[in-house]
């Protein structure tokens, strides 16, 4: 016999749960409605409360009321989010589980006429389940198309670059990240296996920066591979086996006050290379007898070191015993204040390098000057100081470069035919308040500079963001490609990717737009809290017709959470911030910054197959929150160094500090609904995004106890993509520890390899002894939160598939 008291007890428990949930929704819903948000949560709270009351009275109408709530939620959810599985999940999960709970016989025991109500409720739950199943296969955020252009049988030859090599950070100094190799292709990539693994022996220590990262892309020339470690040891490997040949330790002097500790790569010079040698002859400069082949290593404590590529010894005829002091003539030259993190461009005569300066720390920072050094002697040839009235003026004895001038921390690109180096710049620090900046100080900020590589003279410049207050640096190595314009003429183009998602396509000879660019009005005031003191705003900003930003403007419909409750709180949080679209001014109240500080594009850039007129890339979209903190601009400055790019930043010398953080729910999840990361394919004949797919899971973002099935959600990534003539795109970088391969034609995922640590780097590919390899650094990223490691992993096909 059944026990009536059991049903009463279960029903009482259910009533309490329903009442608590109703109260939460009513309080939060009223708060949201007052802020101008959706009234759904008030209606849902009332219906839950009515359900609780009716259930308390053992009234069968409780099931009908709950069924109405469930059906209304399904209709509301699809209206707001479409058939987006991850967007619908927090709208349906709690209510769906509660609905299933109400169907338990113990809950309805003793309620007359409950059967009909339970049937109706079951029907609404089935509708919700069907909608969720349908949404798995009909994602409104993805674009499903095919690139029609075919891969030509013969790839265009590149002077001075062997097809089997990867001799520069972007394979070529044009930054294309494309290889003509096709042994690994879209048909057999699924068979890739680990060929070898090399461990550097370096791990993050307690004395290292919070921004300690492993972002290296190795280079390969002939029978040698060269890579730098996080602490800037240079290692030469056998590319066929991964065995170490030699290593060089520059004895980096770093500590946890450095904002950055990383090495993206090194550069290579060979005096016997026909292209570089010809340029050397033109210059009539002497060549090095000690190091005809040298590796140029940037060191984070402000040095540039030249190492003999054959034996790992210093090139003692370069600079001072093989190194150049990049801190020379710097204002405020403190350790870590100026950090070269990206490999320099090397022409036949000149090493051209920029560097990173500390964000949001002080008005007394080093200069962001770009410099050209003699490739053989290390002698300073030219400068371009972005904040100086005469940017080419080399400081006289006792003089300094201009403090806080905009820097160039991302990799540069080079066109050897034009002898132009392309320099992406950021904003002069402090980043988030600019009331003290002069027109001269901002003249070359957030720009693409085209400089004569031999003289440093400006050829042209283009500014991507005016009066930047959002840290919208130009973050990526630009990509150079010859494309067709609307008239069918071949034009030498440069692709300038930005954190805003705008991809500016310019004639790299003149800087004129190939894809239309429009200056559009942007927000000038904030609606919540006081206006920022002493600040001004650019009335317009440039927007490209080629735009990879996730969407034009967020609304509270795009807020997210694990449940309807934290989704509600994210909606309240969103409505309480200042946000009127991109370029909403920073504020004391707090401003939503979207695209956020990580940007749509970061240092990984994109991969360009000029032969096929196709580009692939991995854009991201994660909002941040910036909050200005009033402060005395004359307050005493403490010890140098910031050690992080998030949290509270002091901005000494201006009337505000700033807090920068990701836009997260009370449970620590992003408040914006997924996807936060994509891969995309673009037809460069039209600049249309032909396909776009989510990439990545949350497998490595949760403790093992809370692991969810590895469903594709679309997670942020730091690191770039490459592509090959085998119709394959390779990319890692995501918050889960994988490297993946995609079909360039349609974006279908073809393969994934599990990495031993985070892969926040750009892969590369080469051929050795007739075998093609794919290599990725799995070293993790300190502030990004992925697992740290010291693994360089190479993949290849099994021997029988060669």
Image: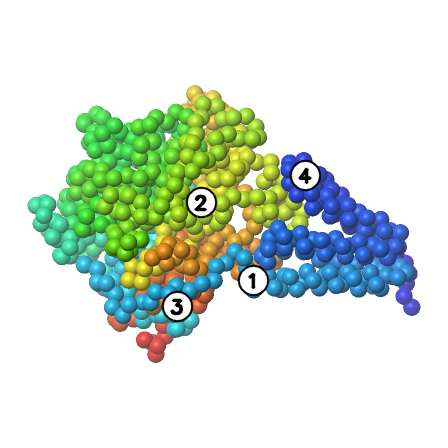
> Which mark, by number, is residue 655?
none
Q: Earlier in the sequence, mark 3 or mark 1?
A: 1
Residue at the spot 50% in from the left edge and 29% down from the top edge? 525
Residue at the spot 77% in from the left edge and 45% down from the top edge? 46
Residue 206 visible in rendering: no
Q: Quadrant of the N terminus?
A: bottom right
* Residue count near mark 1 (Cα–Cα under 10 Å), binned few <14, some 14–19, many ≥20: some
> Which mark, by number, is residue 194?
3
Label 3 vs label 4: CA separation?
55 Å
Q: Are marks 1 and 2 in contact (CB under 8 Å)?
A: no
For discs 2 and 4, the disc positioned in front in the rendered view: 4
Label 4 vs label 1: CA separation?
31 Å
Q: Are marks 3 and 2 in contact (CB under 8 Å)?
A: no
Q: Is residue 304 above or below residue 610?
A: above
Camera-side residue: 492 or 221?
492
Label 3 vs label 2: CA separation?
31 Å
Q: Earlier in the sequence, mark 4 or mark 1?
A: 4
Label 1 vs label 2: CA separation?
29 Å
Label 3 vs label 1: CA separation?
34 Å
Q: Are marks 4 and 1 in contact (CB under 8 Å)?
A: no
Residue corresponding to mark 1: 138
Residue corresponding to mark 4: 33
Give the number of callouts.
4
């Amino acid at each position: 016999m059944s026990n009536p008291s059991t049903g009463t007890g279960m029903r009482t428990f259910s009533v309490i749960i329903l009442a608590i949930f109703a109260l939460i929704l009513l309080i939060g819903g009223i708060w949201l409605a007052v802020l101008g948000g959706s009234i759904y949560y008030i209606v849902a709270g009332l219906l839950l409360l009515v359900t609780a009351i009716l259930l308390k009275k053992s009234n069968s109408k409780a099931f009908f009321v709950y069924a109405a709530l469930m059906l209304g939620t399904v209709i509301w959810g699809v209206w707001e989010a479409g058939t987006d599985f991850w967007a619908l999940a927090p709208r349906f999960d709690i209510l769906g589980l509660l609905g299933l709970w109400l169907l338990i016989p113990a809950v309805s025991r003793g309620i007359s006429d409950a059967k009909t109500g339970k049937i109706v409720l079951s029907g609404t739950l089935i509708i919700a389940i069907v909608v969720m199943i349908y949404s798995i296969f009909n994602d409104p955020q993805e674009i499903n198309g095919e690139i029609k252009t075919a891969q030509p049988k013969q790839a265009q030859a590149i002077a001075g670059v062997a097809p089997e090599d990867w001799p520069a950070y972007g394979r070529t100094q044009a930054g294309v990240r494309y290889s003509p190799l096709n042994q690994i292709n879209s048909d057999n990539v699924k068979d890739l296996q680990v060929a070898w693994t090399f461990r550097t022996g370096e791990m993050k220590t307690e004395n290292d920066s919070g921004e300690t990262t492993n972002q290296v892309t190795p280079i390969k020339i002939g029978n040698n591979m060269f890579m730098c470690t996080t602490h800037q040891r240079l290692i030469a490997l056998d590319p066929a086996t991964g065995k170490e040949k030699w290593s060089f330790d520059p004895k980096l002097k770093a500590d946890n006050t450095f904002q950055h500790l990383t090495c993206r790569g090194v550069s290579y010079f060979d005096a016997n290379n026909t292209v570089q040698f010809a340029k050397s002859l033109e210059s009539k400069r002497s060549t090095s007898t000690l190091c005809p082949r040298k590796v140029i290593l940037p060191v984070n404590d402000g040095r540039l070191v030249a190492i003999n590529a054959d034996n790992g010894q210093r090139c003692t005829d370069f600079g001072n015993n093989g190194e150049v002091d990049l801190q020379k003539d710097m204002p405020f030259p403190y350790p870590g204040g100026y950090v070269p993190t990206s490999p320099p461009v090397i022409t036949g005569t000149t090493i051209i390098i920029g560097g990173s300066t500390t964000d949001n720390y002080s008005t007394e920072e080093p200069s962001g000057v770009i410099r050209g050094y003699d490739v053989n002697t290390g002698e300073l040839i030219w400068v371009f100081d972005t904040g100086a009235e005469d940017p080419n003026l080399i400081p006289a004895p006792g003089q300094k470069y201009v403090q806080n001038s905009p820097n160039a921390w991302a990799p540069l690109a080079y066109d050897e035919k034009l002898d132009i180096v392309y320099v992406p710049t950021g904003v002069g620090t402090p980043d988030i308040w600019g009331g003290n900046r002069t027109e001269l100080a901002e003249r070359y900020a957030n720009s693409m500079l085209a400089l004569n590589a031999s003289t440093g003279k400006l050829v042209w410049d283009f500014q991507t963001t005016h009066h930047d207050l959002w840290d919208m640096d130009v973050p990526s190595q630009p990509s150079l490609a010859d494309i067709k314009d609307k008239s069918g003429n071949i034009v030498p183009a440069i692709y300038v990717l930005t954190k805003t998602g705008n991809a500016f396509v310019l004639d790299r000879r003149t800087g004129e737009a190939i894809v239309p660019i429009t200056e559009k009005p942007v927000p000038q005031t904030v609606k919540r809290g006081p206006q920022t003191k002493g600040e001004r705003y650019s009335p317009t900003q440039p927007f490209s017709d080629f735009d990879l930003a996730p969407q034009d403007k967020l609304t509270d419909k795009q807020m997210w959470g694990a449940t309807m409750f934290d989704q509600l709180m994210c909606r309240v949080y969103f409505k309480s911030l200042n946000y009127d679209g991109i370029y909403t001014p920073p504020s004391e109240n707090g401003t939503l910054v979207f695209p956020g500080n990580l940007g749509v594009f970061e240092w990984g850039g994109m991969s360009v197959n000029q032969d096929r007129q196709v580009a692939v890339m991995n854009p991201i979209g994660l909002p941040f929150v910036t909050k200005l903190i009033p402060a005395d601009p004359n307050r005493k400055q403490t010890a140098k160094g910031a050690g992080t790019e998030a949290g509270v930043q002091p901005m000494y010398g201006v009337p505000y500090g700033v807090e920068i953080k990701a836009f997260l729910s009370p449970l620590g999840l992003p408040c914006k609904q997924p996807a936060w990361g994509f891969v995309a394919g673009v037809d460069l004949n039209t600049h249309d995004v032909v396909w776009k797919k989510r990439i990545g899971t949350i497998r490595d973002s949760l403790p093992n106890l809370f692991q969810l099935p590895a469903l594709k959600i679309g997670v942020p990534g730091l690191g770039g993509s490459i592509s090959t003539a085998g119709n394959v795109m390779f990319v890692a970088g995501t918050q889960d520890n994988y490297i993946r391969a995609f079909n360039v034609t349609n974006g279908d995922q073809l393969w994934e390899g599990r990495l031993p640590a985070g892969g926040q780097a750009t892969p590369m590919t080469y051929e050795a002894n007739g075998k093609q390899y794919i290599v990725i650094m799995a070293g993790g990223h300190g502030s990004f939160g992925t697992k740290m490691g010291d693994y360089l992993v190479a993949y290849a096909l099994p021997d029988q598939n060669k």
